[in-house]
Each structure stands twice: as structure tokens, then as C-alpha cells.
Image (tube, grey):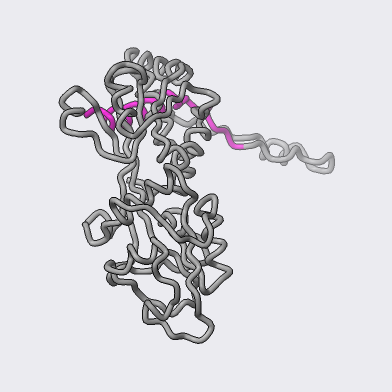
């Protein structure tokens, strides 16, 4: 796999080619003497220049310069993306931030199983999906890069006294089968009927449900906030509310993420298997040496795209 090595090499080359020899520094001459000063004073104020010895500019091999220029040119070339509908809402803002949104590139939707197939048969150069490639897809030459993890969690009001929910009751909760907080063992004054907020019906809701309660869908919700931010606002303003959200989206929200079986939702807990409610977000490609693909990966690893992407998923 060339990604990490190539990206570091190119970034180093970019830094090297940007270096220039700075002009020799010289001490600024002092103010000219006034007319009341004598000849001796004028002689004493003669500026003394200091000669600085500069290091020779770093020599960059011509082939490296050519490589950088090729990547810069490739970054302007169009790419065809196969983005499965479930991950589109998660990655589209980041792709738009680097000029790779649907209005500036050839995007192809389709089922999650079709996104990788589009790359393998040449209909697209890149695919983004919420699953790892299969052994057969890898054997057919599909390369992969893990962008991060969608870690799904339950968010509650900061004053909600519930400290954890057992996983055996999780399915009942997100299916709308639990109607009152007392069914979760909470008898605190001010708490009554549970208000459940989940993603609206569609591919994103299916992805969240697949990570949370495999083989099932959400049901019996009071509302389906259009996005994580809307559901988090609903929870922050209502002690009876509970919402299904992404951990990444909740990091700066005025809510509390509810532990499941005593485990606090986090990327670290998901990576070591203690918190299983997660789904990988993968980028796949066929030709890792394609200059357009390499240029795109550099853009995607840039600060701008990473900052936007970090609001949706936990980055690797």
C-alpha cells in the first residue's frame, strides 16, 4: 500500500520546493545626526553592515519536482465517485469543502454492494461505503483506505439521572417499545414519558440502525430530526428526550452520551471492541498509482477536509 509513504514523500517535497534563499539581513542605519551635531558625531554614526552567511538552497531532484507538478495538475482533473446513499450525508460536506461535491464531480449513487463494483468494472475511480470490502473484492484488486468510524450512541439531557442502559433493553428502546423512564429504572421527579428522536427514514437511518440493532429498523419515534445537530438540540432542551446520534457530532453538544452496559461511547472503546455499535467508513479504489486518485487522497487528508469530516465520523 503506497498511501502513507507517498503522501509523506509528496508533502516533504512540497515543503522543500517552497524554500527560497532569504536576502542577507542588514542592521538598519541609525537616524542621521541633527545639524547641531559636529563632524565627529557624524563619523560615529556611520552604519556598520553585518554580512550573514546563508546556507545553500536545498537541491530538489528534477523528478521530484515533476512528480509534484503532476499531482497538482491531476488535482484539477475530474474523478468519478461511487458514494453509497447511506454515507453520502456523512462525507458530502467534506468533499464539497475541497471542490469534489456532486456539482463538481461525477457522482454515482447505488446500493452499498454496487459502490465497490462500480470501481472494479471501471465505471468509477473511487467508492465510499459503510462496509469493508469482501475477500473477493480485495482479490479482484480493490484497494482500500479506512476514513474513520461511525460510532452510534444515545444522547440524553445532562440532568437525566439514568447512568447506563443494558444492551438487552436497547432494541426495545429504539423500536419504541419502552414508553416511560420508569421502565428503565428511573423514578426521578420530572421524568415521565420517553421522547425518542431518531434519523428520518432512509439510507442514513438504516445505517445507524444497522450499527445499533443489526437486522432491525427504528420504530415508534416521537420525531425524526433531519440531522444529528437537530436531534442534539432537542435533547439539550428536554430532560425526557433521548436521541440516536453520531459520537463525532455530539462532542461539543450540551448533552451527555449514555453508556451502554456501563461502557461510555467513544472511538477508543469501539476500536478495542468494548463498544460494538459502530460501522467503518471506507474509501476504495482500483488503481493506486492513478495520479488523480493520489491527488485526491492528499486533498482529503488536508486540514480543511479533515476538519469537516471530523464533525460526522470519528477519524482514523
Q: Looking at the image, can residue 16 be seen?
A: no
Q: Looking at the image, can residue 208 be seen?
A: yes
221 magenta-colored: no
Q: Nearer the viewer, residue 131 or 288?
A: 131
Residue at 30 percent across and 25 percent down: it is 285
Q: Is residue 48 left or right of residue 168?
A: right
In this rendering, the count of numbered labels is 0
Q: Quadrant of the N terminus?
A: top left
14 magenta-colored: yes
Q: Nearer the viewer, residue 186 or 292?
A: 186
Q: Quadrant of the C terminus?
A: top left
Question: Where residue 120 sits in the image (x, y, percent)?
Answer: 27, 21
Image-quadrant location for residue 251: bottom left
Q: Which residues are magenta?
A: 1-27
Question: Where residue 82 sits in the image (x, y, percent)?
Answer: 39, 27
Question: Where residue 28 sits in the image (x, y, percent)?
Answer: 64, 37
Residue at 33 percent across and 72 percent down: it is 165
Question: Where residue 75 sits in the image (x, y, percent)?
Answer: 45, 21
Q: Is residue 3 left or right of residue 150?
A: left
Q: Is residue 70 left or right of residue 263?
A: right
Q: Nearer the viewer, residue 97 or 264?
A: 264
- Residue 278 sits above or below residue 121 on the image: below
Q: Is residue 65 left or right of residue 117?
A: right
Residue at 45 percent across and 44 percent down: it is 202
Amino acid at each position: 500500500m503506497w498511501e502513507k509513504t507517498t503522501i509523506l514523500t509528496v508533502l516533504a517535497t512540497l515543503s522543500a520546493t517552497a524554500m527560497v534563499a532569504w536576502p542577507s539581513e542588514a542592521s538598519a542605519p541609525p537616524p542621521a545626526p541633527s545639524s547641531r551635531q559636529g563632524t565627529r558625531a557624524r563619523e560615529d554614526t556611520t552604519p556598520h553592515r553585518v554580512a550573514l552567511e546563508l546556507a545553500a538552497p536545498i537541491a530538489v531532484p528534477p523528478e521530484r519536482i515533476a512528480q509534484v507538478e503532476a499531482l497538482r495538475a491531476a488535482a484539477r482533473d475530474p474523478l468519478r465517485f461511487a458514494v453509497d446513499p447511506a454515507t453520502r450525508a456523512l462525507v458530502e460536506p467534506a468533499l464539497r469543502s475541497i471542490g469534489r461535491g456532486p456539482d463538481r464531480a461525477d457522482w454515482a449513487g447505488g446500493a452499498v454492494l454496487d459502490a465497490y463494483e462500480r470501481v472494479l468494472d471501471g465505471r468509477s475511480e473511487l467508492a465510499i461505503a459503510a462496509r469493508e470490502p469482501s475477500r473477493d473484492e480485495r482479490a479482484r484488486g480493490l484497494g482500500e483506505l479506512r476514513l474513520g468510524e461511525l460510532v452510534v450512541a444515545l444522547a440524553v439531557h445532562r440532568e437525566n439521572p439514568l447512568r447506563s442502559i443494558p444492551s438487552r433493553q436497547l432494541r426495545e428502546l429504539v423500536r419504541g417499545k419502552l414508553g416511560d423512564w420508569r421502565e428503565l429504572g428511573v423514578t426521578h421527579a420530572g421524568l415521565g414519558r420517553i421522547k425518542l428522536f431518531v434519523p428520518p427514514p432512509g439510507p442514513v437511518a438504516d445505517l445507524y440502525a444497522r450499527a445499533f440493532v443489526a437486522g432491525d429498523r427504528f420504530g415508534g419515534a416521537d420525531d425524526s430530526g433531519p440531522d444529528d445537530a437537530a436531534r442534539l438540540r432537542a435533547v439539550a432542551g428536554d430532560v425526557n428526550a433521548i436521541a440516536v446520534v453520531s459520537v463525532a457530532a455530539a462532542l461539543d453538544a450540551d448533552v451527555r452520551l449514555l453508556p451502554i452496559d456501563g461502557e461510555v461511547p467513544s472511538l477508543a472503546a469501539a476500536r478495542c471492541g468494548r463498544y460494538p455499535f459502530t460501522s467503518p467508513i471506507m474509501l476504495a479504489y482500483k488503481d493506486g498509482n492513478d495520479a488523480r486518485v493520489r491527488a485526491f487522497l492528499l486533498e482529503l487528508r488536508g486540514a480543511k477536509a479533515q476538519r469537516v469530516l471530523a464533525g460526522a465520523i470519528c477519524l482514523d
